[in-house]
């Protein structure tokens, strides 16, 4: 996808408008999309695609995706949210996904950062350390 | 040849003198009316002064003619031949001397050549010996290098094999452990482990 600088700057501005105190909220996103629907913008499709790309990144940066093979206690999730919020300096919401390949433990992804405390990850690191 | 020439001239001049003595004796004999034995004999043989003088002149002319046209060329030819023979002998002597000199030079050259050949042979032997020694050392160094490289290659191969074995063992251990843990761990165990891991991650992240 080729985006010119104007489209990129416009999409970033829309993302800023979609967040409140650095947090993307559904209400702000709805307002932005409604306003965008009313206005006539050139390359609207391209703008929307770029906006979606940046929105995914913004949502990923404020979401801790916790992969686990089984259930996870609410206490653990709360600990993750509070500690990662403190670490990143922005509100982090934890969501869980099921991943049987981890065997046991968790793997947390926040944006581009990955924290692995799974059995599969430990075994993999063990195998890589043997040379 | 010179001596015979001188004798011939003396005889040429002596003969007329003897004839004159004989004639003188004969003439004196006439004046003394008692001729001598020489005059008597000359008279008996019919020798008279005019005849004697004529014969002397004739003899002198013949002698002169013979001297200039027979003796002198013969003497000249003989002198030339003698000179040629002397020259030939001298030449032969010189040739003999030169031959002896050449023989001596040849012997010296052969001797020098033998010395040079011996020297060259000695040098060649020394050089071949040095070359053999150098080549031997080079061959030993090359053999040592080859052995060292082979040893290094063997060591590398051994290390690689060990690494491969370790990796394979680790892979088998990991896969076996994963399979066993997947089967053996209950859901409760998994949840307990996951909660502990989540809290550990949250703690380490902060």
Image (cartoon, rainbow, N blue to C red):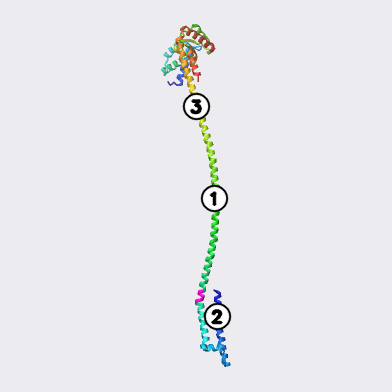
Which residue is denoted by mark 3 in the rendering?
A: B154
Q: Whole-percent x and y of residue B144?
A: 52, 32
**Going from the N terminus, do you reach mark 1 or mark 3 first?**
1
Residue in front for this viewpoint, A46 or A53:
A53
Packing grade of label 1 (10 A; few <14, some 14-19, many >=20) is few
Q: Whole-percent x and y of residue A102?
A: 46, 12
**Going from the N terminus, do you reach mark 3 or mark 2 first?**
2
Residue in front for this viewpoint, A91 or B175:
B175
Q: CA distance from mark 1 to mark 2?
A: 71 Å
Which residue is denoted by mark 2 in the rendering?
A: B11
Q: CA distance from mark 3 to mark 2?
A: 128 Å
Q: Are marks 3 and 2 in contact (CB under 8 Å)?
A: no
Q: In terms of image quadrants, where is residue B122?
A: top right
Q: Chain of mark 2?
A: B
Decide: is B179 above or below B115.
above
SS class of the residue under badge 3? helix
Q: Of circles 1 and 3, which is in front?
A: 1
Q: Of circles 3 and 2, which is in front?
A: 2
SS class of the residue under badge 2? helix
SS class of the residue under badge 1? helix
- Asked if labels 1 and 2 share a chain, the reply is yes
- Asked if labels 3 and 2 share a chain, the reply is yes
**Going from the N terminus, do you reach mark 1 or mark 2 first?**
2
Query: Could you say which disc has been placed on residue B160 in the image?
Result: none
Q: Whole-percent x and y of residue B151?
A: 51, 28
Question: Over which residues does the magenta segment extend?
Answer: B70-74
Q: In terms of image quadrants, where is residue B1?
A: bottom right
């Amino acid at each position: 996808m080729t985006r010119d600088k104007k489209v990129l700057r416009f999409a970033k501005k829309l993302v800023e408008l979609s967040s409140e105190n650095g947090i993307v909220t559904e209400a702000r996103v709805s307002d932005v999309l409604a306003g965008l629907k009313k206005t006539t913008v050139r390359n609207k499709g391209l703008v929307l695609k770029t906006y979606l790309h940046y929105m995914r990144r913004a949502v990923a940066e404020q979401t801790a995706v916790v992969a686990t093979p089984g259930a996870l206690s609410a206490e653990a999730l709360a600990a993750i949210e509070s500690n990662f919020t403190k670490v990143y300096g922005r509100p982090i919401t934890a969501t869980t996904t099921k991943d049987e390949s981890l065997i046991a433990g968790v793997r947390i992804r926040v944006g581009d950062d990955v924290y692995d405390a799974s059995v599969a990850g430990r075994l993999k690191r063990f195998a890589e350390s043997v040379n | 040849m010179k001596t015979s020439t001188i004798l011939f001239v003396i005889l040429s001049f002596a003969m007329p003198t003897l004839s004159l003595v004989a004639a003188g004796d004969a003439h004196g004999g006439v004046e003394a009316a008692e001729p001598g034995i020489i005059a008597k004999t000359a008279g008996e043989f019919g020798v008279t002064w005019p005849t004697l003088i004529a014969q002397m002149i004739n003899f002198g002319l013949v002698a002169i003619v013979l001297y200039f046209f027979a003796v002198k060329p013969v003497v000249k030819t003989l002198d030339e031949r003698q000179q040629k023979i002397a020259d030939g002998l001298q030449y032969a002597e010189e040739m003999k001397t030169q031959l002896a000199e050449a023989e001596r030079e040849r012997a010296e050259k052969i001797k020098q050549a033998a010395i040079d050949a011996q020297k060259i042979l000695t040098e060649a032997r020394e050089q071949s010996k040095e070359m053999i020694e150098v080549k031997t050392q080079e061959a030993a160094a090359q053999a040592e290098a080859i052995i060292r490289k082979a040893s290094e290659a063997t060591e590398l191969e051994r290390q690689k094999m060990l690494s491969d074995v370790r990796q394979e063992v680790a892979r088998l251990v990991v896969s076996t452990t994963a399979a066993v843990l997947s089967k053996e761990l209950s859901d409760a165990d998994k949840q307990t482990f996951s909660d502990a891991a989540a809290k550990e991650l949250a703690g380490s992240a902060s």
